[in-house]
Image (cartoon, rainbow, N blue to C red):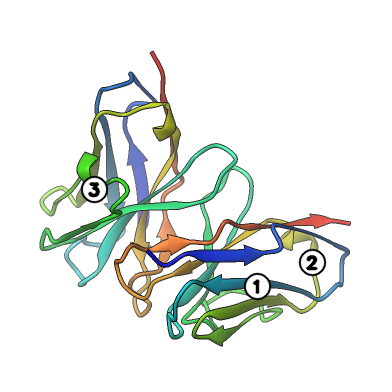
Amino acid sequence: DIQMTQSPSTLSASLGDRVTITCRASQSISVWLAWYQQKPGKAPKLLIYKASTLESGVPSRFSGGGSGTEFTLTISSLQPDDFATYYCQQYNNFSPLTFGGGTKVEIK
Amino acid sequence: QLQLQESGPGLVKPSETLSLTCDVSGGSIISNTYYWGWIRQPPGKGLEWIGSIHNSGTTYYNPSLKSRVTISVDTSTNQFSLKLYFVTAADTAVYYCASPHSTAMLAFDIWGQGTMVTVSS
């Protein structure tokens, strides 16, 4: 299995801050990585796929980068709606599909 | 607009079978070559992929659950289903069905609202 490790597990930040979440894969997954946002009691929402492609309708303050084994999700200026938990997911193949452990973005 | 909705019992006894159905509306389950998926999330924990099925019936399962899982598709009713056998308390979770993205076909862009399943006697 390809293990996905996210850091940090919790991030405290203020409105307007630039925040970056890291996701590392245990082996190369090229650019086959997605990022999701999840709010309490809700289903995950796809933000980014293919490591850096913004899903339609997602604000441009979200951006993704990386390839191979190291990836980042950056929020350029944190907004009230962005306080949530973020997950990465590798989809290199069905071997199996795996998610990172999540990063909770909290209000500082 | 494609919508997915999970349904099934919210309480299952240990050693019994968890059965859930995902109703797909706003589009046909055979209108694409996608792999429809099931994902679960234990209370307070992260996401775990259970498995995926193509409308042709081809399936892929998480090896950690493979011996206890069956996913099937019914194109006549536009639904796909999950069966998880011999459940234990560790299977207590919110279960989601999801539709893959049109280009990133193994990422999921449309999710059901999720259904909480508790395993308890």
Q: CA distance from mark 3 to mark 1?
A: 30 Å
What label does residue A22 carry, if any?
A: 1
Mark 2 touching mark 1, by CB under 8 A? no
- Using the image, determine if residue A3 lies above or below residue A64: above
Residue labelled with disc 2: A79
Q: In this view of the protein, can residue B2 be seen by the observer?
A: no
First in residue order: circle 2 vs circle 1: 1
Disc 1: CA contacts within 10 A as few (<14), some (14-19) or many (>=20): many
Q: Which structural element holds mark 3?
A: helix
* Residue at 48%, 66% in the rendered image: A89
The three-letter code of the residue at mark 2 reads Gln
Real-space Cα distance between discs 2 and 1? Answer: 19 Å
- Disc 3 marks which residue? B66
Residues at marks 3 and 1, common chain? no
A90 vs A14, nearest the viewer:
A90
Q: Are marks 2 and 3 on the same chain?
A: no
- The residue located at (46%, 82%) in the rendering is A50
At mark 2, the secondary structure is loop
User: SS of the residue at dot 1?
Assistant: strand
Q: Residues within 10 Å of mark 2 (few under 14, many from 20)?
A: few
Output the chain of dot 1: A
